[in-house]
Image (cartoon, helix red, strand yellow):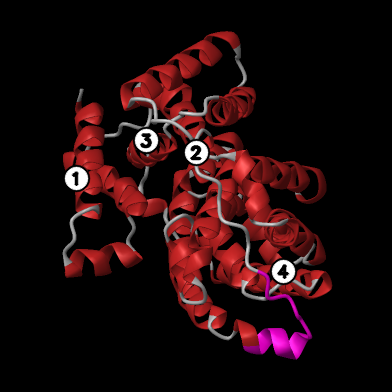
């Protein structure tokens, strides 16, 4: 019973604190987001109680039901039909950024083969298992990050190190993108980019959205049915991803707003459950890993800039696409507003597309690491 109480308390507390509009809380959650607090709080409470809940049955429920529910909810928030409004060139820049995030760490690890960082840190100490969750975080957000952590079986102490470093980098990156997007016109001139076209307005969805309880019932039924029919965890995730897309795009009145909010809550639930396994005494930070991540992140931006120049697409789409990948649904439109407020809905759509594709990109990273590096 105790793990369930800790999880419930953590989710309720972090959910409401994250929505409490107080200046000092805003500053706190800017650097310690709700997802990180939801991970640390159960670990702290478990340590205070002197209890070890790492083998409790709640972890089985999380893997079988909580994570799948988060996936199908998030996937059902994407409307594929609206993507055409963005235009194929900005979408190509976005996809190029996602591809680079998924593939470049493997290429860089191969280039550094034989070094202490690769042989001792990545392979021997298993820090390579923290790379796919970063791919999931940078492309898909918290949902993909959690799924990939389970798939690759990333140790808790490595996962916490990754969470902390990732959060610091994303906050710094967001500040840089805020400043960078304001200089897009100047960058266009220097690169010889002449594109100044506005994307088409997003088409509205017709009809009154389904009642949240109806949506919840359909999502729960999907999770239970797939859990009964499909044994392998990865296969269940992929099938539920497809189910989510079908619900959102075949049901014209599907409540995408509710689905996205449900996904956010389930992410907090999963993080709280994972926190029950965390041991602070095993956590350590690797300076070489931080340098690895910095090269990875900066090269991601540079590669997208090259693609934008090759396609003659407004350089403003580079920070927008980067924040849709690395930042997410909150920061992408905020950064976009610093350049053109009319593009904000398109930034949100790109961020949702990122959430929908992050798991698949992360699975590619795992496959490449196991094939070429480990």
Say which residue label 1 marks.
13
- Residues marked 4 and 2 touching at CB (< 8 Å): no
The residue shown at (49%, 17%) is 222
Picture quarter with the N terminus: top left
Q: Nearer the viewer, mark 4 or mark 2?
A: 2
**Mark 3 or mark 2, earlier in chain:** 2
Distance between the Cα atoms at labels 4 and 3?
33 Å
Q: Are discs 1 and 4 less than 8 Å apart at CB?
A: no
> Viewer-nearest of labels 1 and 3?
3
User: Magenta segment, which residues?
Assistant: 186-197
Q: Which of marks 4 and 3 is in front?
A: 3
Label number found at residue 205: 2
Number of the label disc, if any, that sits on residue 304 = 4
Label 3: few (<14), some (14–19) or many (≥20) C-alpha neighbours in 10 Å = many
Q: Is residue 207 visible?
A: yes
Which of pointers 1 and 4 lies earlier in the amino acid sequence? 1
């Amino acid at each position: 019973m105790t793990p369930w109480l800790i999880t419930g308390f953590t989710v309720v507390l972090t959910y409401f604190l994250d929505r409490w509009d107080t200046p000092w809380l805003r500053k706190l959650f800017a650097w310690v987001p709700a997802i990180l607090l939801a991970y640390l709080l159960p670990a702290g409470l478990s340590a205070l109680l002197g209890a070890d809940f790492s083998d409790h049955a709640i972890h089985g429920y999380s893997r079988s039901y909580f994570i799948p529910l988060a996936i199908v909810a998030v996937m059902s928030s994407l409307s594929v039909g609206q993507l055409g409004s963005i235009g194929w060139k900005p979408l190509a820049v976005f996809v190029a950024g996602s591809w680079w995030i998924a593939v470049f760490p493997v290429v860089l690890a191969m280039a550094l083969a034989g070094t202490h960082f690769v042989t001792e840190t990545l392979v021997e100490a298993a820090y390579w298992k923290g790379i796919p969750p970063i791919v999931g975080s940078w492309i898909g957000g918290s949902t993909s990050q959690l799924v990939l952590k389970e798939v690759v079986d990333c140790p808790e102490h490595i996962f916490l190190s990754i969470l902390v470093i990732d959060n610091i980098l994303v906050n710094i990156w967001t500040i840089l993108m805020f400043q960078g997007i304001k200089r897009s016109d100047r960058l266009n001139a220097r690169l010889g980019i002449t594109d100044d076209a506005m994307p088409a307005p997003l088409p509205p969805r017709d009809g009154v959205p389904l009642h949240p309880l109806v949506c919840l019932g359909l999502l729960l039924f999907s999770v239970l049915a797939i859990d009964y029919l499909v044994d392998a965890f990865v296969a269940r995730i992929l099938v539920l991803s497809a189910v989510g897309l079908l619900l959102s795009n075949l049901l014209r009145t599907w409540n995408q707003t509710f689905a996205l909010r449900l996904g956010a809550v389930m992410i907090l639930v999963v993080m709280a459950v994972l926190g029950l396994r965390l041991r602070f005494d095993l956590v350590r930070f690797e300076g070489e890993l931080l340098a690895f991540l910095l090269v990875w992140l900066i090269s991601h931006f540079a590669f997208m800039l090259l693609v934008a120049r090759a396609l003659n697409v407004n350089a403003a789409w580079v920070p927008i696409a980067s924040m849709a990948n690395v930042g997410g649904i909150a920061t992408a439109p905020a950064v976009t507003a610093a350049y053109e407020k009319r593009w904000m809905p398109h930034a949100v759509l790109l961020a949702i597309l990122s959430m929908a594709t992050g798991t698949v990109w992360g699975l590619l990273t795992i496959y490449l690491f196991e094939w070429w590096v480990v």
